[in-house]
Amino acid sequence: MILNHIWGLYTHPKEEWTEIDTRHESMMYGLTHVLLVALIPAICGYYAAAHIGWSIGAGDPITITQSSAVLLAVSMYGAIIAGVFALAYMMQWMATTFDSNPTLTQCLELAAYAATPVLMVGVTALYPVLWFVALSGMVAVAYSVYLLYSGIPIMMHIPEEKGFVYSSSVVTVGLVLLVTILAATAMFWTLGFGPEFMG
């Protein structure tokens, strides 16, 4: 099954990373995982924005038109996939510094599975209250960082002390990618590509 490692990453991550490292599925397997799991925040975000409405504080929920919500959902989906691939590429590029020589497939597996909690927490958008989604997102990011720190020494076959520094570098790259995506979103909104709000 495509999503068979998710439960193991939540219940016994180190053992699951070892199993992932032992099996090393194909690039298509890792890609399919990303393509499926990235649908969760895109679909839930679309539904929340167009049909439920976001509660930012006091007042009525804020909704946008369905066409705007579709555009945002498709953009989010593309940005997620591009971000996971960029992270995988950067992992492979940085690996030689840490005496490791992983394939792009290994790096994609690591990036995809480590990002899974952040993507799965997209289901919280179905209860679109800002504080709740933000708090859930912070917990998911913390667990994704934990997965990176526990998975890199196993997947990259490097000692834990080097794995810590490598993981810290990967987390930094991930944060830079996130800020880049957010900055690009803000730029597009200021150029007139922002959503159309419902009256």
Image: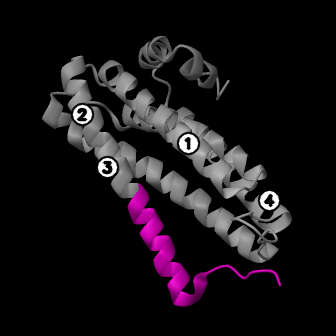
Specify whether residue 84 is painted magenta: no
**Disc 3 target residue:** 173
Disc number for residue 192: none
C-beta proximity under 8 Å, tags 3 and 2: no
* SS label for mark 1: helix
* SS label for mark 2: helix
Please tell me whether residue 188 is drawn above or below residue 25 in the rendered image.
below
Q: Position of residue 80 (x, y in %)?
A: 53, 54
Return the disc, 4 or 3, that comes first in the chain's sequence. 4
The type of residue carrying mark 3 is Val
Alpha carbon of mark 1 to alpha carbon of mark 2: how far? 20 Å
Q: Position of residue 138 (x, y in %)?
A: 52, 43
The type of residue carrying mark 4 is Tyr
**Disc 4 target residue:** 47
The type of residue carrying mark 1 is Val
Alpha carbon of mark 1 to alpha carbon of mark 3: how far? 16 Å
Return the disc, 1 or 2, that comes first in the chain's sequence. 1
Alpha carbon of mark 3 to alpha carbon of mark 2: how far? 11 Å
The type of residue carrying mark 2 is Tyr
**Disc 2 target residue:** 166
Image point 49% across, 18% down: which residue?
A: 13
**Disc 1 target residue:** 118
* SS label for mark 3: helix
Q: Nearer the viewer, residue 98 or 62?
A: 62
Q: Looking at the rendering, which quadrant does residue 59 occupy?
A: bottom right
Dot 4, how many residues are within 10 Å of its Cα: few (below 14), some (14-19), or many (20+)?
many
